[in-house]
């Protein structure tokens, strides 16, 4: 009986922390760094998104470094560049599914009017959601972190391998 009770508490805490992640803009204060300022950019890295892959697949960063990611969708489908962790992406998955179900997006287009209507603008500082041919920037200052990377949370894409790695270089 006690094991079941403990499990129930653990599941509740896990659920609550997932909601906290979702409410915290999918990034800031989760130990992955914070939005950077344009005047502090140390480096510019171009990232291309194509069907189920990023180029480059892995990016080395230094603690405290501010990087401007210039992200371009060169594919034929909507893709996302989202800096985060598995836990953050898992928490974001339901929001992306809802965006599909409510007609805010299709595999090839974003419906910005419907996104505004539902109050789901997908304007977090650690993430960009782009239609084919679109380009956007993400400026991020990295803090020391264990496991993080970038992924596409369009349903089926991360599962299809659309994930990249951020490697923290301590030198």
Image: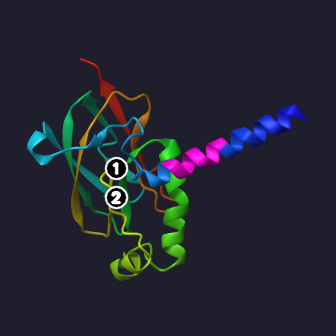
Quarter in which the N terminus is drawn: top right
User: Within 10 Å of the Cα at label 2, are there few (<14), some (14-19), or many (20+) other Cα atoms?
Assistant: some
- Residue 26 falls left or right of residue 44: right
Rendered position, 10 above or below 20:
above
Q: Secondary structure at mark 1?
A: strand
Residue range corresponding to the magenta coloring: 13-20
Q: Position of residue 110 (x, y in %)?
A: 37, 75
- Residue 14 falls left or right of residue 134: right
Quarter in which the C terminus is drawn: top left
Q: How many marks?
A: 2
Question: What is the CA distance from the residue labelled 1 to the residue labelled 2?
Answer: 6 Å
Judge whether residue 150 is colored magenta: no
Can residue 48 be spotted in the picture? yes
The residue that mark 2 highlights is: 50
Q: Nearer the viewer, residue 164 or 53?
A: 164
Q: Are marks 1 and 2 in contact (CB under 8 Å)?
A: yes
- Residue 74 falls left or right of residue 84: left
User: Within 10 Å of the Cα at label 1, are there few (<14), some (14-19), or many (20+) other Cα atoms?
Assistant: many
Q: Position of residue 82 (x, y in %)?
A: 37, 51
The residue that mark 1 highlights is: 54
């Amino acid at each position: 009986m006690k094991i079941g009770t403990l499990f129930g508490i653990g599941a509740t805490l896990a659920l609550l922390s997932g909601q906290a992640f979702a409410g915290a803009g999918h990034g800031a204060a989760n130990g992955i760094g914070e939005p950077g300022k344009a005047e502090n950019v140390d480096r510019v890295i171009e990232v291309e998104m194509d069907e189920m892959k990023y180029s480059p697949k892995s990016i080395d960063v230094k603690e405290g470094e501010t990087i401007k990611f210039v992200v371009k969708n060169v594919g034929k489908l909507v893709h996302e560049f989202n800096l985060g962790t598995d836990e953050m992406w898992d928490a974001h998955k339901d929001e992306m599914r809802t965006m599909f179900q409510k007609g805010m997006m299709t595999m090839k287009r974003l419906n910005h009017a419907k996104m505004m209507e539902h109050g789901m603008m997908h304007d977090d500082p650690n993430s960009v959601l782009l239609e084919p041919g679109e380009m956007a920037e993400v400026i991020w200052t990295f803090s020391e972190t264990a496991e993080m990377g970038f992924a596409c949370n369009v349903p089926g894409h991360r599962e299809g391998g659309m994930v990249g790695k951020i490697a923290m270089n301590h030198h």
